[in-house]
Image (cartoon, rainbow, N blue to C red):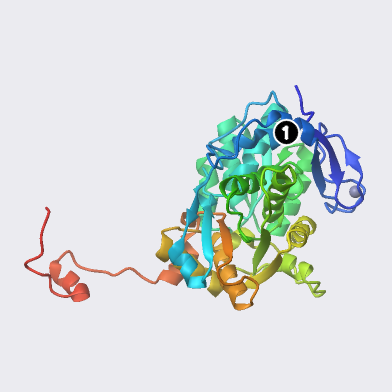
Amino acid sequence: MALDHVETLECTLCGATYDPEQVVYTCPEHDGVAGILEVVYDYDVVQDRFDASLDGDIRSQWKYRAFLPVDTEATPVTLDEGGTDLLDVPRLGAEFDVDLRVKNDGLNPTGCFKDRATSVAATKARFAGRNVVTCASTGNAAASLAGYAARAGLDCRIFVPESAPEGKLVQPRVYGADVLAVAGSYDEAYDLSLDVTNAYGWYNRNAAINPFQIEGKRTVGHELADQTRDSIPDWVVFSMGDGCTIAGCWKGLREFAELGYVDDTPSMLGVQPEGASAIHDAFHGHDDVDDVADTLADAVAVGRPRNTLKACRALEESGGTALTVSDDDILAAETLLGRTEGIYAEPAGAAPIAGIRRAREAGIIDPDESVVAVVTGLGLKDTAGAKRAVGDVIRVQPSLEDVADQYGTANPDAESSI
Ligand SMILES: [Zn+2]
């Protein structure tokens, strides 16, 4: 057994360090869960074990196993997460006058970016001999954890706010999980999951407090560095909820640059809905932070983000910034992405596209700069919001006359291949 490439867990607030073999979620020196821990690696050991080449050929995120905080003896719990396509999207890019690519992480096994982190969590939980995994979720992490628990043969018990979209409440149950719908907000579901973790000793996957979660998320940064090694973008754009995702990606991008695998790093642009903007507000130094989350982008409907510190650090270190967009902007972006490029994102996954429009208007992104938007979730998970944006279907009788009402009389000389 060897976890010798992980040096220590270091508190982001006070710098205290902890043994990575211990199950420790947050630094006990601080109230609540404020003392988020950072995984610190011995990069000499990591580099000795990383024998892959950066050639853009990525079957799954386990290409970067040497960088993941799992024991060398552990067998991965995997559904081939990661390795998602980085697509040129010229029609969409022309809308904003930028050189745009989309990394479509909605194509992960459960339809969400979070599978990267969950694969690592399930691998660690099973290797540690834990039988029950739990988390609180706005929906996506629940489905993801349930899927990977099934894959690993573990019991899964998850806590979601009762307002989560119906599709997201069905998916984890298909994977055999117990779904406890909490009569309250995500923040209340989150607090309950912590109480339960302490009371029952279940393995908690909550990304913000489980220090290993963000480590799986950083493989999206490794992949972006791998896929853009000859054309590092000026900007990488994410939506932000708890803040772990953008922070994880930045850590991956930064370490590949520091290790000399790539020459440069992009600036990170974080996008939040106007109704759930706590990280944006903190980054810009606003005092009157409102901790109520009110947005149709349920995957980022977080009133009290757990990883504001790491997210703000990612924005600052990368020379990036944060901005907000309205729910109407997000819906418009969702249909624009679908209509121009055939990519169906959930609202939180489309928010980066709305953010690029806003950033162009504000002069944050200049014309012809290169931009990668990361779509974090699949649109089929939540069709209710999009339904508002696309209107109703066209209803017809099964007759040519009704079709003619729509498109005019058919051409009798038209060639038929039937
Ligand atoms: Zn501490």
Give percent across and percent down for residue 203: 72, 37
Q: Is residue 234 left or right of residue 329?
A: right
Badge 1: how crowded within 10 Å, few (<14), some, or many (20+)?
few
Q: Position of residue 197 (x, y in %)?
A: 76, 42
Where the N terminus falls, by quadrant? top right
Is residue 177 among the parts visible in the rendering? Answer: no
Q: Residue at x 55, y 59 (%)?
A: 349
* Residue 60, position as x, y percentages in the image: 55, 38
Q: Residue furthest left?
A: 413
At 72% from the left and 58% from the top, the residue drawn is 187
Q: Identify which residue, 307 or 152, lies in the foreground.
A: 307
| Mark 1, residue position | 47
Q: Is residue 209 visible?
A: yes
* Callout 1 amino acid: Gln
SS category of the residue bearing label 1: helix
Residue shown at 77% from the left, 30% from the top: 45
